């Protein structure tokens, strides 16, 4: 067995300081296509629930993708094709058959169908809970106990333009063009409250107040108790997307592609300007808003701070995201096409955890010349580091363990040419091991010179051969 000698030079440089608390989003963001997890190409939606992402398919399947275990499972086979329409409220997923005559209510937590209802195709489900179904049926609103298959309450409404509905606790709310309908499920009674500001977005409810966008470009705060508009905030463009709420702030993503954070008192806290086109409704994280934008150079994701004004941007390049982003388990997830364009795979976007390996020089490596290897540990506190170098046959040439408070730069002098792999493994305080690699190609100038010299001598010898003449 041929043993390749190697030379290690330790460069004594200061190590980096660390902060125990890793922010939700840092300047080190990366994307990862989870190629080992193929998805049904006919999925039509994705949304977050617990530590999983739920993916219904038009083929009648519902899949669950675990972001912790990185595995996907088929949790139900409905048994017939589905419409590309769903409603998810209170842990219940409402699905419809292609013709709309069958409604399926699926409990995500229990992973089972809790009700199968036969309905007229025009019937539209606008709210759902574990016991009740809020239904728009012709010119009537109805609440049905889907477990008992009984009508709780049904009544006609004059305002036939229904924007959205939701069941919240013991009440149901339906936002219409000119009014909001409040249904008391316990008392089986309804109250119609007139609105002076015409809604064009879904409503956000906080306590006894609803927030929505109106046709006059306002964000409206309406008191259900006082039955008045408490304030309105004029936006540059209309607010069509449902407002969001976090840390005492109402988040309005207006049609000008900008994002406005407004206090519950009606004052502007701060706003974020975007010079690109918003592709989807933004995803709400714990401390950030994640927004997918289309630019001239491709797709970007902007991360806007909520607690304090901060901005980070990540370029997704030419990757096309198929669904609005969802937040789950500290990361943003979406779906993209596979290499063949025939299937779909999940894509994860969030903080990078691990090592950025840099070499000096960055290319044109030569035998006998020092390669300085710098390790930048990203978003890991007090890591134990192990660096290894392998040749093209994955034989280990160098191995060194580095403690978190030791220098993270070494010098390596290759003594032979070929392809080499630098492998860095980090173990954090919790015992999580992460691995990063970098390949480099080393040339051997003296070997190349010897081969050229040999070829030259051969050609010269061939040229000096006597000619074989025949008479």
Image: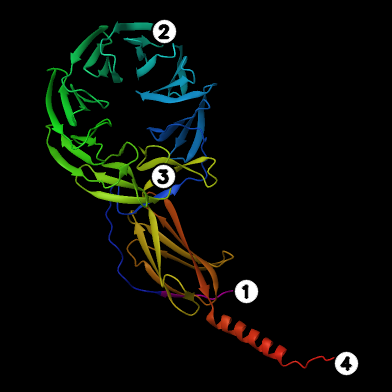
List the residue tagged with mark 1: 2
Task: Out of 243 and 201, give the one closest to the viewer.
Answer: 201
Which mark is first along the chain, 3 or 4? 3
Q: Which mark is residue 471?
A: 4
Label 1 neighbourhood size at 10 Å, few (<14), some (14-19), many (20+)? few
5 to 49, vertically: above or below: below
Task: Say if mark 2 contacts mark 1, CB within 8 Å.
Answer: no
Marks 4 and 3: which is nearer the front? 4
The CA distance from mark 2 to mark 3 is 41 Å
Q: Main secondary structure of the magenta part?
A: loop
Marks 2 and 1: which is nearer the front? 2
309 to 51, vertically: above or below: below
List the residue tagged with mark 3: 348
Q: Is residue 225 left or right of residue 159?
A: left
Give the residues in magenta.
2-9
Residue 68 pos. (x, y %)? 43, 40
Residue at 55% x, 74% y is 417
Residue 226 pos. (x, y %)? 12, 17
Q: Quadrant of the N terminus?
A: bottom right
Q: Quadrant of the C terminus?
A: bottom right
The way the protein has been coloured in the rendering is rainbow
Marks 1 and 3: which is nearer the front? 3
* SS at mark 1 in the image: loop
Residue at 42% x, 34% y is 53
């Amino acid at each position: 067995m041929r043993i390749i000698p190697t030379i290690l030079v330790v460069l004594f440089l200061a190590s980096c300081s660390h902060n125990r608390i890793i922010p939700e989003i840092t300047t080190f963001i990366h994307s990862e296509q989870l190629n080992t997890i193929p998805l049904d190409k006919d999925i039509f939606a994705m949304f977050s629930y617990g530590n999983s992402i739920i993916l219904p398919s038009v083929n009648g399947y519902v899949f669950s993708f675990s972001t912790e275990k990185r595995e996907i499972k088929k949790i139900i086979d409905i048994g017939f094709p589905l419409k590309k329409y769903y409603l998810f409220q209170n842990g219940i997923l409402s699905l419809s058959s292609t013709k709309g005559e069958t409604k399926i209510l699926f409990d995500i937590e229990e992973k089972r169908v809790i009700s199968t209802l036969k309905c007229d195709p025009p019937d539209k489900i606008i709210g759902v809970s574990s016991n009740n179904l809020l239904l728009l049926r012709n010119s009537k609103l109805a609440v049905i106990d889907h477990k008992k298959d009984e009508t709780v309450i049904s009544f006609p409404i004059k305002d036939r333009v229904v924007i959205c509905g939701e069941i919240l606790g013991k009440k149901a709310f339906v936002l219409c063009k000119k009014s909001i309908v409040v249904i008391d499920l316990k008392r089986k009674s309804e109250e119609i409250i007139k609105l002076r500001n015409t809604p064009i977005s879904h409503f956000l409810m906080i306590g006894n107040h609803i927030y929505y966008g109106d046709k006059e470009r306002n964000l409206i705060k309406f008191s259900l108790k006082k039955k008045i508009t408490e304030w309105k905030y004029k936006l540059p463009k209309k607010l069509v997307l449902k407002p969001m709420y976090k840390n005492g702030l109402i988040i309005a993503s207006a049609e000008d592609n900008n994002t406005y954070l407004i206090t519950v008192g009606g004052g502007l806290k701060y706003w974020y300007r975007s010079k690109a086109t918003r592709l989807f409704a933004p995803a709400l994280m714990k401390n950030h808003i994640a927004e997918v934008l289309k630019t001239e150079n491709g797709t970007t994701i902007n991360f806007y701070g909520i607690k304090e004004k901060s901005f980070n941007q990540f370029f997704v390049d030419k990757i096309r995201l198929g669904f609005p982003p969802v937040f789950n388990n500290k990361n943003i997830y979406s779906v993209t096409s596979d290499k063949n364009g025939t299937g779909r795979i999940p894509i994860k976007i969030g903080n990078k955890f691990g090592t950025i390996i840099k070499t000096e020089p960055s290319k044109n490596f030569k035998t006998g010349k020092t390669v300085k290897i710098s390790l930048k540990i990203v978003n890991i506190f007090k890591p134990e580091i192990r660096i290894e170098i392998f040749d093209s046959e994955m034989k280990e040439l160098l191995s060194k363990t580095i403690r978190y408070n030791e220098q993270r730069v070494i010098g390596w002098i290759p003594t032979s040419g070929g392809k080499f792999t630098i492998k860095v493994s980090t173990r954090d305080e919790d015992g999580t091991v992460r691995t990063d690699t970098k390949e480099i190609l080393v040339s051997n100038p003296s070997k190349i010179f010897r081969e050229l010299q040999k070829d030259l001598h051969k050609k010269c010898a061939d040229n000096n051969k006597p000619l074989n003449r025949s008479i």
